[in-house]
Amino acid sequence: MSRIRRNLNYFRFNYSLFILITLFHSLLWHPFSMIVFLLLFLLWIFLYFSRDESIFVYYHSIYDRFVLLALTIVTVLALAFTNVGFNVLISLIVGFSVVVYMLLFEVLMICS
């Protein structure tokens, strides 16, 4: 279990990017939702992917996990309000399933 936790923390950037790309592919036939997603993706790039140091608000550091959680919630809610809730749900299930599969595969490769 500690190995899974360590890999999840180490590859958090890659896993979140994979889930976002999966979500993007599910929106190819919904242009308005894709525009909303692209605007949200710019937020992801600015607040999560392109920075090396923590965000400071009123001299307090905000942890990366909180930023990741907040951006995930905002993305899912914004896309759910654009009437593509089923597509968002299916793409998130596929994305999380592949991430869990990759985590388990790596743990099994190390254990054997």
Image (cartoon, rainbow, N blue to C red):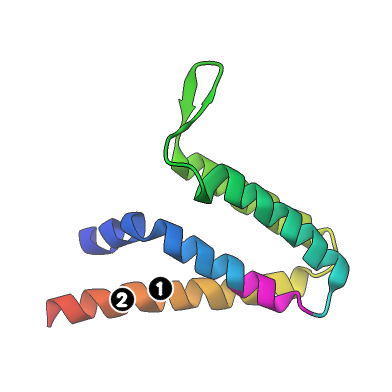
Toward the left, the furthest residue is: 112
Circle 2 residues within 10 Å: few <14, some 14–19, many ≥20 = some
| 28 shown above or below 41 | below
The verdict on residue 23 being magenta is yes
Q: Residue 42 at x, y = what percent?
A: 67, 52
**Numbered circle sitting on residue 100:** 1
**Magenta stretch prevailing secondary structure:** helix
Q: Is residue 48 above or below residue 76?
A: above
Q: Nearer the viewer, residue 94 or 59?
A: 59
Taking 101 as reference, is 62 left or right?
Answer: right
SS for callout 1: helix
Helix, strand or loop under label 2: helix
| Magenta extent | 22-28
Between 10 and 39, the residue placed more toward the observer is 39
Which residue was labeled with disc 2? 104
Q: Are marks 2 and 1 in contact (CB under 8 Å)?
A: yes
Q: Amino acid at mark 2?
A: Leu
Q: Is residue 19 left or right of residue 3?
A: right
Which amino acid lies under the numbered mark 1 shown in the image of this protein? Val
x and y, in percent, of residue 56 in the image: 51, 25
